[in-house]
Amino acid sequence: MRNTYVHGYSRREADRLSDQAGTLEELLHHDTVFPDGSRILEAGCGTGAQTAILAHRSPRALITAVDLSETSLKKASLRIDAQGIDTVYFHRADCTRLPYADHHFDHVFVCFMLEHLAQPGDVLAELRRVLQPGGSVTVIEGDHGSFYCYPETAAARQTVRCLIDLQAESGGDALIGRRLYPLLAGAGFNDIRVSPRVVYVDPSRPEWERGFSRDTFIAMVAGVGQVAIERRMMSPSAWQRGISDLKATIGKGTFHYTFFKAVGRSPGY
Amino acid sequence: MRNTYVHGYSRREADRLSDQAGTLEELLHHDTVFPDGSRILEAGCGTGAQTAILAHRSPRALITAVDLSETSLKKASLRIDAQGIDTVYFHRADCTRLPYADHHFDHVFVCFMLEHLAQPGDVLAELRRVLQPGGSVTVIEGDHGSFYCYPETAAARQTVRCLIDLQAESGGDALIGRRLYPLLAGAGFNDIRVSPRVVYVDPSRPEWERGFSRDTFIAMVAGVGQVAIERRMMSPSAWQRGISDLKATIGKGTFHYTFFKAVGRSPGY
């Protein structure tokens, strides 16, 4: 039963692109389904955005969601309660030293967490420890270096570069998507399959122009504007120009970003 | 009948990614199929590599393949003859002034040509002129700016930058893939659908490491080495380092490149 999970969904299905997936959620998560009754660990649940998706897509799986931040866990718990979900257990835990026995979980899931870590391999090794032999790990991360657009200006590129550099300074890696295969291999997982999840946006996809280009990606870049300017990484006018150049792609140009989803299996089966 | 072509293939099928397509040909061409008896124009056939694929995939279509170069046409003709194909007619022609009446063709096809042109919109407008109302245009181009890898060094990136800059100096645009939507829209085509065709390579795909990373992409970059060094765009040692850094991704890292396929329709139907 467990052995059927990783190979149990159609890979052709899995790798369809963004224009078929109505939403980012579908693009990233449509092929994450866990068996009824299986014990799932979500490592680094944050405020529970992915937790809710997991629970909805695998309504009979038993999800343990951990995070280091008590504040995040409270928000996540409120979110899950508000949705009437009763299959999620929240625990405060450090993902490099999880309070679980070896092989405690059937499957583990990590989304948008490794990008924040200086040593993502340590967390992956710990996840492997608590995973059943033959159990699967699923990792989803972005890669800001995969971004490009048309028209593309130097100022626009530089704003994105600021985001990448700031994340590197705080010990993370905004270019982690491209590293998922070597990271999982280095942590000892087997049968690793990585699939790029491409967001391609042009004026024929106005819902992606709004929902992804403007409200997700450009909003995220704009979020570091104050710090980037204070740190003199860019002048205020260059920053403003860069952000408006990014916005100028909407309605006439194109916008490109790639997420990566990796699935691996714990050895020993 | 013609109206069924553009929408006649499954878009979900069409947009599957590289790891399902066994070869680059399948990734780019599997969803290009023209009806029996339809008149197809291939603009800029070069030495006929794509022509042979077209003819094999649509064996009862009538293909007219044009190019400006007599030498290329001779090679293309030999290639097609050697394969026993008898559905292709070669003509020497300038794609900005085609020797055909308005609406002469049912469908037009362009692959890896627009990247070489200073005014790709002019060719697209001319293609629209010779296309039946409601007929389709198919354009396939790469985008060297979509390339990234892991590990990635400054020298590796710079070798690719040399290729992009040299193509720009000779009047082309190696970043044309991202422009297909606005180019087709600007040339007056309707119902434009662009799909990225992502090549994702990691050590689980050794045939792509050899066939794409090493023998296609790195070989292409290496091909401009002499010119780049003569022009002092990079020192000989920096160039060598860049090329070996690109090769060092093979067997342990990842390699990323995106082609774009656009299909549009001539208005007036």
Image (tube, coloured by chain):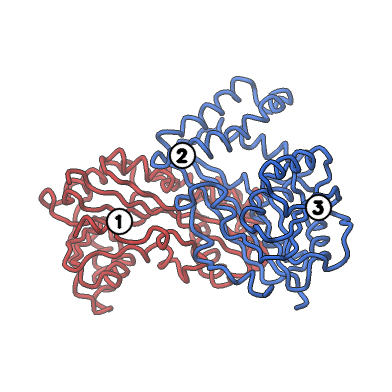
Chain colours: A blue, B red
Q: Position of residue A149 (x, y in %)?
A: 49, 40
What residue sits 60% from the left and 32% below the top?
A219
Looking at the image, residue A201 lies above or below residue B60: above
Disc 1 on helix, strand or loop?
Answer: helix
Q: In the image, which is nearer the foreground, mark 3 or mark 2?
A: 2
Give the position of the N terminus of chain B as an image quadrant. Answer: bottom left
User: Along the line of sight, which residue is nearer the eye, A87 or A111?
Assistant: A87
Q: Position of residue A218 (x, y in %)?
A: 57, 34
Q: Amino acid at mark 3?
A: Gln
Disc 3 on helix, strand or loop?
Answer: loop
Separation of marks 1 and 3 at Cα, in angstroms: 48 Å
Q: Amino acid at mark 1?
A: His
The label on residue B7 is: 1
Q: Amino acid at mark 2?
A: Glu
User: Along the line of sight, which residue is nearer the eye, B228 or B89?
Assistant: B89
Confirm or deny contact between disc 1 and disc 2 (CB under 8 A): no
Chain ID, mark 1 = B
Q: Which residue is mark 2?
A: A207
Q: Which residue is mark 3?
A: A119
Marks 1 and 2 belong to one chain: no
How many other residues sit within 10 Å of disc 2, few (<14), some (14-19) or many (≥20)?
A: some
Where residue A127 sits, quadrant-wise, is bottom right
Q: Position of residue A151 (x, y in %)?
A: 45, 36
Separation of marks 1 and 2 at Cα, in angstroms: 21 Å
How many other residues sit within 10 Å of disc 1, few (<14), some (14-19) or many (≥20)?
A: few
